[in-house]
Image: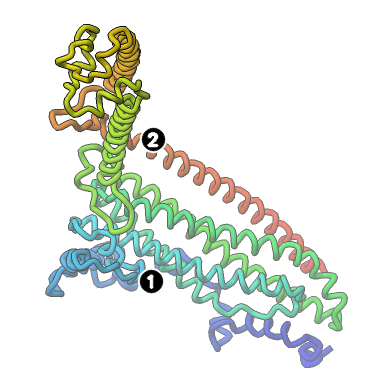
Amino acid sequence: MSSDAIDEAIPQPTRKYHESILNPHVDSMDEVQRPPLTLSEELAQTLGDSARGSGQSPLEDYLSELTTEVESDASESGVTPQAAAKDEIASGKEPQDEGTTGANRLYEKHRLDELPAEAKLLCRIADGIIEDMEKVHSRVVILHDFIKARNDSKISLLDWGLYKDYRAMDHATFSLQKTVETFRIFKNRTPEVILSAFDAHYYKHRSIALSTSTSTKVEYAFNTTIPRVDMLDAELEKSLLTSEGQETAKEMVISELQKLINHLDKARVQVNDANDVLLNGLQRHVVFFKRKDVEHIPVTWKGWTQKNWQRAVRLCLSSCAWVIVVAICAMLLQNLLDGKLFTSTPRETAVKADPIVNPDSVVNPDPVVNLDPVVNPDPVANSDPLANTTTSFVSLDVFNDRFEHLEELYAAHGERIDNVWDSLGPPDEDGYYQYSNDKGQTTEEPRRSHQTELDQETKDIQQLRKQIHRVDLRLTRRLDRLQRKVGGR
């Protein structure tokens, strides 16, 4: 069969595979036959061309340029970013989201305190790593959506078409590798830079999230392509291709799948390496919540610092103490009001209604005073001395019962006050209760909780990485078997 007949027998999507393999990015066949450069060789070649005119490493030149750029940020503008941030806070405006690149995100977080130049440079490089990881992740997401759309549509591998954005993925991966090497140089050169806990928390959690998401999408791509490769022979038998056309189409499809898997695996490895380098590097540059460093942690626009959290704890304890004191006073007042509203005898009502009678004579325990006509000039009451004597004794019994009840209440309230005193201790001279615990004790439990969560996430990532390696090994063995079958035929 002639080559023209074979080309006519191959469908249009398969012919696209053939054209892509023969001419992916260039026009000459000489460049197609040239073996592709690996990422490390491309990095060495690019850095070698850029470093011919200088005596030091090209990455060190890049790091020096970045240092000069950071130092000249404030001098190029009339107002420093910190001063502009303070004016914005004073005016009560919400900060505008200018992205997560470079010094914009750095100055957005540090609104009040000015960082040293080395800390700014470290944040700038870490921002570059996060930005490059996001670019690689976006390219992996695009390729993941490409595979998912065709897999959900139950399209045959012969009709999948070509993916033409491998060059953009390689460029993003190369840029990430260069930024990671820059971070390694800076970490070895300045090992004592102190970074705020807020920045470290952002970088670590963002890096872990990007690494986990990238590995998950790559694992989905591997799990999707492996069973489709096993079904390739059945799909070729159902097609209208001749035997030679089937062999050619099978070789092209396998070659395209190898290219897809290699690019995904390269992106996954580079993102995981960047995540490991960033986490290990920041572990040396961050001081977490030591008591002497609390005042040096910058105040951020969003979230509370440790100082605000401790102030909230003290305010909560003071509020609880005031609530207890007010509740005790309210109970005492209520009990006193209940005592004064105690049911009185008719004799007491008559005495209270008479404006001439001295109130002290009512509570006098001597019954003779109540019979004195000078104190009680009522002729009706004096007309029956026996009745007055009986009424006086009854009133004295009522008052004695009332006094006993008040004594019991007084003893009960005294015990309550003693219990409160024993629980909270004596207040200060102003009547306030001060929180006397150590500041470090209030932050020890949250720090342990965050460390436990971080360790669990690290274990999950390691387990996911092992599973991906197993999938990669199984896929590689199956591809080798397919290649041996093709070669045997």
Callout 2 amino acid: Glu
Which quadrant does the C terminus fall into?
Answer: bottom right
Query: Where does the image place residue 132, in percent across and percent down from the top left?
Result: 42, 66
Query: Where does the image place residue 365, in percent across and percent down from the top left?
Result: 23, 9
Label 1, on which residue?
A: 46
Alpha carbon separation for disc pair 2 and 1: 49 Å
Q: Can residue 264 be seen in this view?
A: yes
Which quadrant does the N terminus fall into?
Answer: bottom right
Circle nearer the viewer, 2 or 1 = 2
Give me the residue at 58% from left, 85% from top. Answer: 29
Q: Is residue 441 visible?
A: no
- Specify few, some or many for label 1: CA neighbours under 10 Å numbering under 14, 14-19, or 20 or more: few
Label 2, on which residue?
A: 445
Give me the residue at 15% from left, 74% from top. Answer: 76
Nearer-the-camera pick, 397 or 456: 397
Give me the residue at 35% from left, 34% from top. Answer: 444
Q: Residue 184 carries which label?
A: none
Nearer-the-camera pick, 43 or 349: 349
Give me the residue at 49% from left, 75% from top. Answer: 168
Judged from the image, the secondary structure of the residue bearing numbered disc 2 is helix
Rendered image coloring scheme? rainbow
Q: Is residue 300 above or below residue 150?
A: above
Callout 1 amino acid: Thr
Query: Where does the image place residue 418, in percent across and percent down from the top left?
Result: 28, 18
